[in-house]
Image (cartoon, coloured by chain):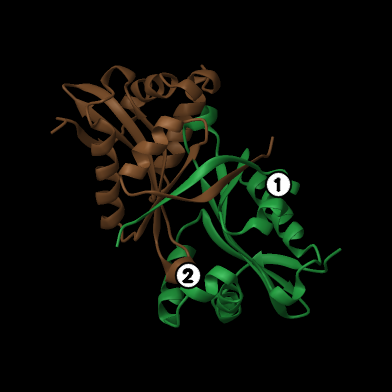
Chain colours: A green, B brown
Amino acid sequence: MTGVTFREATEADLPSVLALMTDDTLGAQREGADHQAYVAAFRAMQKEASNVLIVGERDDRIVATYQLTIITGLSLRAARRAQIETVRVASDLRGQKIGEAMVADAKTRARKAGCTLLQLTMNKSRTDTARFYERLGFTPSHIGYKCDLT
Amino acid sequence: MTGVTFREATEADLPSVLALMTDDTLGAQREGADHQAYVAAFRAMQKEASNVLIVGERDDRIVATYQLTIITGLSLRAARRAQIETVRVASDLRGQKIGEAMVADAKTRARKAGCTLLQLTMNKSRTDTARFYERLGFTPSHIGYKCDLT
C-alpha cells in the first residue's frame, strides 16, 4: 500500500503539478515560468470530457501526476484506447511503488471508459523508465514520432 | 499535385475506409467483419469535437484516410498537440505522393487548431514507412508502448 489517493486535479493543484513537472530531467529544461499558459491549458482540458489531469495525493501533498486521454477510433476492430502523458512522481519518493499505483489507477480508469488498450510514448533517453513500463505489461512495439510545427 | 481532396468523413464513407484499413499488411490480420462496431465507433467520434476521421477523395473514390486527434496538455509549456492514427493510402496508388499530401493536410489542420506538435506512433515492423515520416520532418525520439487491457 502506497497510501496515495488518485483523483482528478483542480485548478488549485496546478502549482504542485508544475513543481512535479519541473522536478524531472527533461522537464527541468523545457518547462517554463509562464504560469498563465498552464492555467489556460488546464481550463481547456476541463472542457474536453475525455482528457483529464490526475493527481496522486498523500497526507495533503500532491506526490504524483499524469494525464489520461480517452480516444475512440476505428483501428483494432474499433478499439477505444487510453493514452497517458506527463507521468511524474516526486523525486524524493521514488522506490515506493507510487508509479506502479499510478499505472494501476490509469488501467482502472481506462477500463471503466471502455478502453481495451493503454498506450504512451516515452522519450528514448529515459532508459530506467523503460524497464518500469515493461515490468507493468507494456510492450515497446512502436516508434514514437514527433514533428515540431512551430 | 495529387488531385486528392481531404475532408471529414461521413458515415457513408465507412465501407471505403474499412476497405483501406484491411488493404494493409497489419490491418489485414487484425481488422474484422463486425461492421456495426465500426459504425458505433464512428458515431462516438463524431460526438468528440477534437477527434475526427479524414478521407482523401479523388474522382469520387476514397483513396486515403487518417484519424486526427487534438490533445490539450500541460507538457512542453502547455503545448497543444495533434496526433495521427490509422494512416492509409490505397495500395494501388502508392508512389503518387498521396501520403505526403495527407501529412501536409494533417499539419494544416493541426496548426489551425493551435497545435505546435504533431505526433504518431508506428509499428516497428513498418520499416518502409519510417523513412517516409523521417523525410517529412518527424523525429523518432520516443518509444511507443502499448498495454493490452483485455
Question: Badge 2 local density, few (<14 within 10 Å), some, or many (20+)?
Answer: many
**Numbered circle sitting on residue A42:** 2
Q: Which residue is mark 1?
A: A134
Residue at the image position 16 percent from the left and 21 percent from the top? B59
Residue at the image position 47 percent from the left and 32 percent from the top? A74
Left/right placement of residue B96 relative to residue B120 reads left
Left/right placement of residue A136 relative to residue B12 reads right
Query: Callout 1: residue from which chain?
Result: A
State whether residue B147 is above or below residue B117.
above
Is tag 2's residue or tag 1's residue first in the polypeptide sequence? Answer: 2
**Where is residue A148 drawn, in percent x and y?**
35, 58
Residue B70 visible to the viewer: yes
Left/right placement of residue B101 relative to residue A110 reads left
**Mark 1: amino acid:** Glu
In this orientation, which residue lies closer to the viewer: B141 or A57?
B141
Residue at the image position 58 percent from the left and 46 percent from the top? A119
